[in-house]
Amino acid sequence: MNKNKIAIVIYFILMASCTCKMSLESVFKQDFIRAIKKYIREDASSHVSYLILPVDGLPYNGTKQPKGLLVGPLYSNIKSAYIIRLMSYYGKTVYIYSRNREFYKSSSVESPISYCSPDSCIAYDNVYTIDPGLNYMKRAALLYYENDKLYIKNDISPLFLPILKSQDVSE
């Protein structure tokens, strides 16, 4: 009888371990998770959702392609078919962008996405824009590793956006 009880207990332990989801900590490095959480805590605009976006394939200025991941507010110009819910923190939701969503086990978004409200930023001199792509680049931070150390670059717009120079305008 004791052998049956032990076998049943082992069976249930194995079944429970098979249904456990992989934790965020087992996928990402702890310092990366801490950096994302710090970015959310220090976000002055207190956005409702954030997007982690790989920089591979983004247009860039200069000769050397930046490496790493961007984190910034999630605006509605990103198709939901390409984002995967990653975590919640302080009532905010963090998503990761992937064009290869079919490779992920949990590829569906469980609840409706709360996109950030349209925002404005200065594009040039006193010209404001509400373009979601520009807003993302103006508010995002670049997280990258160099020599096994995580670095965070907050002012990333010069890396990815065109640099406009003022010209003398004659009337």
Image (tube, helix red, strand yellow):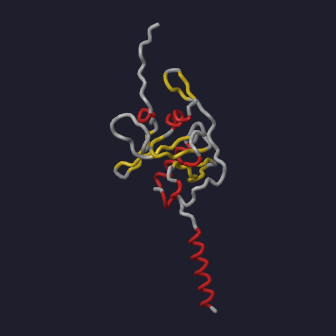
Seen as rendered, the residue at the extreme bottom is 1
**Residue at the (42%, 13%) spot, across then down:** 168
Quarter placement of the N terminus: bottom right
Please determine whether, in this image, residue 26 is positioned above or below residue 144: below
- The spot of residue 58 in percent (x, y) is 44, 40
Seen as rendered, the residue at the extreme right is 112
Residue 94, visible in the rendered structure: no
**Residue at the (52%, 48%) spot, across then down:** 97
Number of numbered callouts drawn: 0
Please determine whether, in this image, residue 138 is positioned above or below residue 171: below
**Residue at the (64%, 47%) spot, across then down:** 113
Please determine whether, in this image, residue 4 is positioned above or below residue 91: below
Seen as rendered, the residue at the extreme top is 171
Q: Residue 49 or 83: which is nearer the viewer? A: 83
**Residue at the (43%, 24%) spot, across then down:** 164
Residue 10, visible in the rendered structure: yes
- The spot of residue 85 in percent (x, y) is 58, 52
Quarter-of-image position of residue 161: top left
- The spot of residue 95 in percent (x, y) is 56, 49
